[in-house]
Image (cartoon, rainbow, N blue to C red):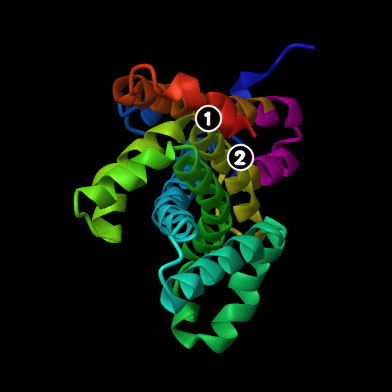
């Protein structure tokens, strides 16, 4: 079966072929009529925006919660922080992501009224960010626990406080260790962003569903969307692989890969 890529040059309003549609997308020609290719590129932008915002939230909260889970037992306050961070992880990673998206979109704004003013992509990004933060927290915890116990003891012997030990000794090494599993998590986040269609965010999955209904060219539409998801995930993979290579601790990460696998 031959692919009809001309479907992407059709006008989204009347189905007529739009002139110079490929050139217009890259700014090489002027075109006032929106084509399905224009719609596809905008949908890709929304997918990347949701994934990027979710990743920012997930990294911040994930590193904090993962670190809190490894605090030494120095009293009631530290034990409380460990329990709270553990509860965070267990809560958000054990509820299906689609359910969390609906809760953030339909339920929580009914109790926290200012959230009603937020656009849907913010709410879905928060849901994705919280869900992913629970998984990143576990990776950070594993990375910290993979460090030799002498690291913490050496920091204490130098007179560093707990906060200083984490900031200057433990986290800089642990975060380098968790880059490989973090790469998979970031790639998963690109794919998980597809749940945004459920709250009408005009991202790739919603585009595919609507464009297929309007054009009846499901093969071409879903093939293009699949390639963009794969391209996005591959770009994240290569970027984090480069970061891992630049930040690798010679002779250390390889020695501890086995402990992380368990």
Point 53% across, 29% down: residue? 233
The residue tagged 1 is: 233
The residue tagged 2 is: 191
91 lies above or below 152: below
Membership of 40 in magenta stretch: no
For this orientation, the residue located farthest to the left is: 159
Membership of 220 in magenta stretch: yes
For this orientation, the residue located farthest to the right is: 1
Where does the C terminus fall, quadrant-wise? top right
Which of the labelled discs sits on residue 206, or is there none?
Answer: none
Q: Position of residue 19 (x, y in %)?
A: 46, 26
Q: Which residues are magenta?
A: 208-222
Where does the N terminus fall, quadrant-wise? top right
In terms of secondary structure, where does tag 1 sit?
helix
Point 31% across, 40% down: residue? 172
Of the pair 102 and 260, the residue shown nearer to us: 260
Mark 2 and mark 1 in contact? Answer it, CB < 8 Å.
yes
Apparent side of residue 199 relative to residue 247 in the rendered image (left or right): right
Can you tell which quarter of the image residue 109 is in? bottom right
Point 49% across, 75% down: residue? 80
Say whether disc 2 or disc 1 marks the residue closer to the N-terminus.
2
Point 71% across, 36% down: residue? 215
Of the pair 48 and 68, the residue shown nearer to us: 68
Q: Position of residue 125 (x, y in %)?
A: 50, 58
Measured in 3D between alpha carbons, the distance from the residue under mark 2 to the one under mark 1, in whole angstroms, is: 8 Å
Q: Position of residue 201 (x, y in %)?
A: 56, 56
Q: Residues within 10 Å of mark 2 (few under 14, many from 20)?
A: some
For this orientation, the residue located farthest to the top is: 2
């Amino acid at each position: 079966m031959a692919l009809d890529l001309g479907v992407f040059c059709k006008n989204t309003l009347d189905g007529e072929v739009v002139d110079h549609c490929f050139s217009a997308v890259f700014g090489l020609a002027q075109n006032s009529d929106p084509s399905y290719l224009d719609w596809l590129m905008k949908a890709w932008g929304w997918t990347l925006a949701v994934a990027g915002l979710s990743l920012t939230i997930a990294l911040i909260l994930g590193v904090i919660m993962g670190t809190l889970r490894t605090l030494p037992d120095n009293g009631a306050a530290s034990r409380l922080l460990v329990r709270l961070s553990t509860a965070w992880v267990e809560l958000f990673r054990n509820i299906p992501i689609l359910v969390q998206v609906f809760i953030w979109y339909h339920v929580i704004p009914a109790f926290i009224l200012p959230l009603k003013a937020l656009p849907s992509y913010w709410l879905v990004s928060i849901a994705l960010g919280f869900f992913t933060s629970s998984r990143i927290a576990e990776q950070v915890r594993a990375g910290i626990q993979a460090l030799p116990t002498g690291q913490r003891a050496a920091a204490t012997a130098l007179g560093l406080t707990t906060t200083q030990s984490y900031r200057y000794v433990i986290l800089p090494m642990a975060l380098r260790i968790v880059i490989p599993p973090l790469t998979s998590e970031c790639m998963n986040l690109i794919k998980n962003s597809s749940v945004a269609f459920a709250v009408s965010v005009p991202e790739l999955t919603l585009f595919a569903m609507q464009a297929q209904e309007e054009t009846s060219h499901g093969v071409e539409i879903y093939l293009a969307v699949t390639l963009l998801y794969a391209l996005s995930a591959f770009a994240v993979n290569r970027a984090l692989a480069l970061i891992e290579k630049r930040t690798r601790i010679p002779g250390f990460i390889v020695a501890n890969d086995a402990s992380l696998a368990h």
